[in-house]
Image (tube, coloured by chain):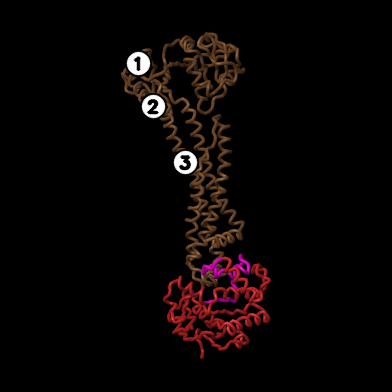
Chain colours: A red, B brown
Amino acid sequence: MIHTENLSKTYRMGEVEVQALRDVNLEIKDGEFIAIIGPSGSGKSTLLNLLGCLDKPTSGAVFIDGINTGKLSENALAEIRREKIGFIFQQFNLIHTLNALENVALPMFFAGVGREARLKKAEELLVKVGLGDRIYHKPSELSGGQQQRVAIARSLSNDPEVVIGDEPTGNVDTEAGDAIMDILEGLNRDEGRTIIVVTHDAEIAARAGRTKRMRDGKVLD
Amino acid sequence: MRDKFLLAFRSIKERKARSILTVLGIAVGIAAIVALMSVGYGMEHAITGELTEMADMISVMPGEIRGATYVERGSFTDRDVSDLQRIGGIKDISTMTYDAAKVEYRNENVPIFVFGGDTKELEGFYVDPVGLKEGRWLRENDYKGCVIGDRVANDFFDEVLHVNDKLVINGEKFIVVGVFEKGDMLYSNDVDRNIFLTLRAAKEVLRTDEIKYIIVRVYEIDEAEGIAEEIEERINDNHGLDDFAMAMTMGSMIEMMGDIFNIIRGVLAGIAAIALIVASIGIMNTMLMSVMERTHEIGVMKAIGAKSSDVLSLFLLESSIVSLMGGVIGCLLGWVVAKVLSFLASTASGLEIAAIVKPEVLLGGIAVALIVGVLSGFYPARKASKMSPVEAVRYG
C-alpha cells in the first residue's frame, strides 16, 4: 500500500519558486487501478515521480508498505525502484543502443539476475506484450506503440507490485493506446498489480477503477 | 562482471568515431613513451657495449676534462712510463704521441694531425671498431707507411687519396698503405681527420719525444679503478701537481655515459609524459561528453533500479576499456616506431643502434594507460553516478 502525508514539492527556477505539489494526502490500496488526471502543470508528473521514488519531497512523506521513503538512502531507493516499482514513461525511455530483449533484461541485470535467466524472462515478457517476433529489434526499428510495449515489459521484469505510468498512451495513436491500456488492465485484473496512471485523456481515465483529479498542485476530492 | 563489460563495450562501439579518436590519443602518448625509452636503451647499449669490449683498458692523459673540453697540461716523460711499469697488475703499457704536421700532396699543403703509437695497440683501438676500406694496417716496421682517415682521403685535398699515393709529412716521404672507413659518432673525431704512423716514425717527423697519451691494459678488470688511481698519483708526484694526469678506466667512462643517458631518458620521458597528459585530457573530455550526451540514459538506468555505484562502475569500465585498448595499440605502435627511429639513428650516426624494447616498458606503458584511463574517467563517472534520476530522465 502507498500513502502520502502532506506531500509538497517546491522547485526553484532561477529567482522564482514554483510549488508543484501542495500538501497532498493520498492513499492507494494494493491491487488498485487509479488514474490521476488534470491539466498540464497541475503537478501530476511531480506526484508520480515522488510515488515512484525518482525524486524526494520538499516536505511531507511517501510511505510504501509503511516505510517512509524520504528517510531511505540513495541505494535503498534504487532498490525500491528496482524491486517494487515498474515505471512506464510517456517517451518510452528505452536505451537506444540495446535491442528490445536487452532493454527488458536491463533492470534484472541491475538486480543481479544471471544472464540466461534474465534473457529467458525478458523473452517471456516480450511475448506477453505481443512482441515475440521483435525481440532483437532496436528501439529505432519499432513503432511508438511497440516501443511502449517494450517499456511495459521492462517495467515488469523484476515482478513489481506497483506499475506507474506517466502518460503511457500520450505518444501513441488511439489503437496502440487502447492496446497498452488492455495490457495494463490485464496486469491489474489478472495479476493483482497496483496500477497508477497519469493522463489527461478522460477516456483512458475512465478505464481505471478510481480517478483522482489534480489542479494547481492539489488533489481534488 | 562479464555483462557489465559487454554493456560498456557496446556503448564504446556505438560511438565508434569518438572512441577510435580517444584510443588513438592514448596510443600516441604510450607509443611515444615506449619508442623513446626503447631507443634510449638501444643507444645506451650500443655505446656502452663498445666501451665494455675495452673494459681492461685505462686511458692516461696529461690534462683534465673540464665540462666538455679537454685541457692539456703538457706531456708525459720517460720517467712517468718507467714508473708505471713498476705498478702491479698492469699487463701492457703503450705510449702515443700526436701533433699537427704540414702534409703535402701534389703541391697542396694542408695541416693535419699525425698520430703515432704502438701499432698493435692502435689496431685494437681504432682498426677493429672502425675498419679499413682500402689496403692494410701498419706493421711495426712500416717506417715509411701511413694509414689515413676518411676525411683526409676524401676532403682535405683536391684529389681523393688512395693506397699507394705518396704524402710528404713535415718534409719526409710516406706511402699510404691503408685508408680507414668513415668513423661513427664515437670515432669520427679520433680517426677521420688523422694520419696514423708507427710510434718511431711519428717521433721522427714530429721531432719530439713527448708522450701525449698512454694506454694501460690490466690483468684484472676489477682492479682497474685502483690502478688508475695509483697511476694518477705517481705521475702527479713526478710533475709536482695534484691534477696533472687523468687516468680513466672504461668503467668510469661507462658510468659517465650512464649518467648522461639517465638525463637523456629523463628528458625523453618528460616529452612522452606531456603527450600522455594531452591524451588523458582527451579521455576526460570524451567521457564528459559521453556523460552529458547520455544524461537521459543514466536517468533511465537509475529510474529502473541502477544504483549510483552501478553507473560509476559502468562509466569507469568504459574509460578503462578505451585506455587499455589505447595502451595495447600504443605499445605495438611504439615498438614499430622504436625500430624505425633506431634505424634512422643508426644511419645518421654510423653507430649500430638496435632499439631495445623491454617487456617492463611495455607492461609499464599498458599500466600507465590504464591508470590514466581510470583517473581521467573517474570525474565524469562520478558526475554521472551523482545525477538525480528525475532530472536526468527529463534531460533531452
Whether labels 3 and 1 belong to a single chain: the reply is yes
Specify the amino acid type for callout 2.
Answer: Asp
Identify which residue is drawn at 37% across, 25% down: B223
Residue at image mark 3: B267
- In this view, B156 is above or below A213: above
Q: Chain of mark 3?
A: B
Magenta segment, which residues? A85-114
Specify the amino acid type for callout 3.
Answer: Val
Q: Position of residue B134 (x, y in %)?
A: 60, 18
Circles 3 and 2: CB atoms closer than 8 Å: no
Spatial CA span between label 3 and label 1: 46 Å
Identify which residue is drawn at 56% across, 42% down: B335
Q: Position of residue B308 (x, y in %)?
A: 48, 67
Say which of marks 3 and 1 sits in front: 1
Residue B103 located within the stretch drawn in magenta: no
Q: Chain of mark 1?
A: B
Spatial CA span between label 3 and label 2: 33 Å
Q: Which mark is residue B222?
A: 2
Q: Which mark is residue B86?
A: 1
